[in-house]
Image: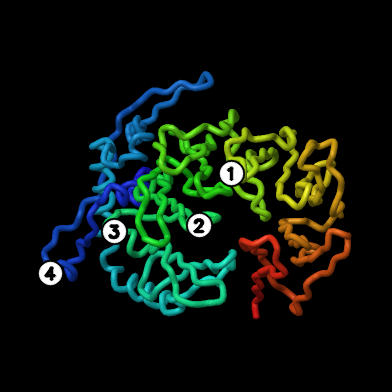
Amino acid sequence: MIRRFAFVLTATVLVACGAENGSSNPESNGSAMTKPVAAPEAEKRPLEITQHGATRIDNYAWMKDPEWQQVLRDPATLDADIRAHLEAEGAYYKDQTAALEALRKTLFEEMRGRIKEDDASPPAPDGPYAYYRKFREGGQYPVFVRTPRDGGEETVLYDGDKEEGDSPFFDIAAVNHSPNHALVAYGVDRLGSEYFTIGVRNVETGEDLPDLIESTDGDAVWAADSKSFFYVERDDNQRPKRVKRHILGTPAAEDRLVYEEPDDGFFLGLGKSQSGRYIFIWSGNQVTSETRFIPAAVPEMAPTLIAPREEDVLYYVDHHGEDFLIRTNADDAVDFKIVRAPVAAPGRENWTDLVAHEAGTYISNFVPYQNYFVRSERKDAKPRIVVSGYDGTEHEIDFDAAAFSLGLSSGYEFDTRTVRVAFESPA
């Protein structure tokens, strides 16, 4: 088990440390006399541990770097003994699987041949532009672009293939354009630590602003004036712990703390209402949640709690007109319902049903638009999409198929008569 465990660490740590790739296959290095690599044996360093009145011996506790939090941020600080063992495991693996290199290439090329490499997402309109991402043939990462709304020349917002550079690891969390369409905020991890750095780029010039925000989840939610954005900061234990606001042109060290989650068992998330008027701070776990809101036009305002957390009560908020619309399992609505709550007084005592709970019909998502709201649900184990008016009228979108899956994409716009639905069936 130690060898298997160490190999997993090789995949996650050594890639970030910049371990060299290679092979001990005699056919690949031109030497038929290459000496086989010996199987490494992890050294036993007995450590006596007493917990809950029981004592045990851990021979391999030394393989957890006591400064693992620092290693996440700077892999070069990994303990030398741990690194040496991981590198030995890596070399042993390459030696033992060298004969499979040709098969790996064959399988890779076969799978690659079944993929449309130069694929692209459908353009999503937002004001004067349409935004989408695409892949180029032979590329590894998405290219984020936009065009004029009705078509025209592409403007590249962020090119993952070019931005990767010589990073040993590269992951893009998100690329979010500002409400005035002049800027994009992008979140990138170059270490494999899942600490993302948010940068900001001028769309017209392609130049990066000096603003860099470290230790985030990579997602930026813009205020209405495009002069600041909110983000989630991760703590030293990788927990999404704090929501902060960054004002462009100011040092990240001066970013204001907006909300800090006191419960280590809860996770934080950020979002914006479909209307664009409110920024939501979601906090919760698998069974309990609560949400706070900030007017996007008044980003300096302190967040307001909609309803305090109650054990086993989940709720998810959006906005329409003078009301928040909330999907919730409150009041024993085990399959969820949708309620209204006045923005001015959104507490539980003021929640009224918009779509009542129906046992056996699970409401999985909903999107409010200016004149309609759309929900996805599952009834009799079959997915469906229902379009409703705020006057109570509704109709189901018909899909002439016996078995299929559905996805609901909200898009960027609020005042629209178009909703995007993803349909997939065995046919």
Marks 4 and 1: which is nearer the front? 1
Q: Amino acid at mark 1?
A: Gly
> Which mark is on residue 269?
1
Asked which secondary structure carries label 2, the reply is: strand
Q: Amino acid at mark 4?
A: Gly
For label 3, the crowd category at 10 Å Cα-Cα, with few meaning under 14, some 14 to 19 and many 20 or more, is few
Marks 2 and 4: which is nearer the front? 2
Circles 3 and 1, Cβ within 8 Å, touching? The answer is no
Circles 2 and 3, Cβ within 8 Å, touching? The answer is no
Marks 3 and 4: which is nearer the front? 3
> Which mark is on residue 30?
4
C-alpha span from label 3 to label 1: 30 Å
Outermost top residue: 53
Q: Residue at x 29, y 40 (%)?
A: 42
For label 2, the crowd category at 10 Å Cα-Cα, with few meaning under 14, some 14 to 19 and many 20 or more, is many
Q: Is residue 223 above or below residue 158?
A: above
Question: Which tag, 4 or 1, sits closer to the chain's start?
Answer: 4
Q: Which residue is mark 3?
A: 165
C-alpha span from label 4 to label 1: 53 Å
Is there any visible trace of residue 262 in the rendered image?
yes
Question: Which tag, 2 or 3, sits closer to the chain's start?
Answer: 3
Question: Which tag, 2 or 4, sits closer to the chain's start?
Answer: 4
Q: Amino acid at mark 2?
A: His
Q: Which residue is mark 2?
A: 177
Asked which secondary structure carries label 3, the reply is: loop
Numbered label tally? 4
Circles 3 and 4, Cβ within 8 Å, touching? The answer is no
Q: Amino acid at mark 3?
A: Gly
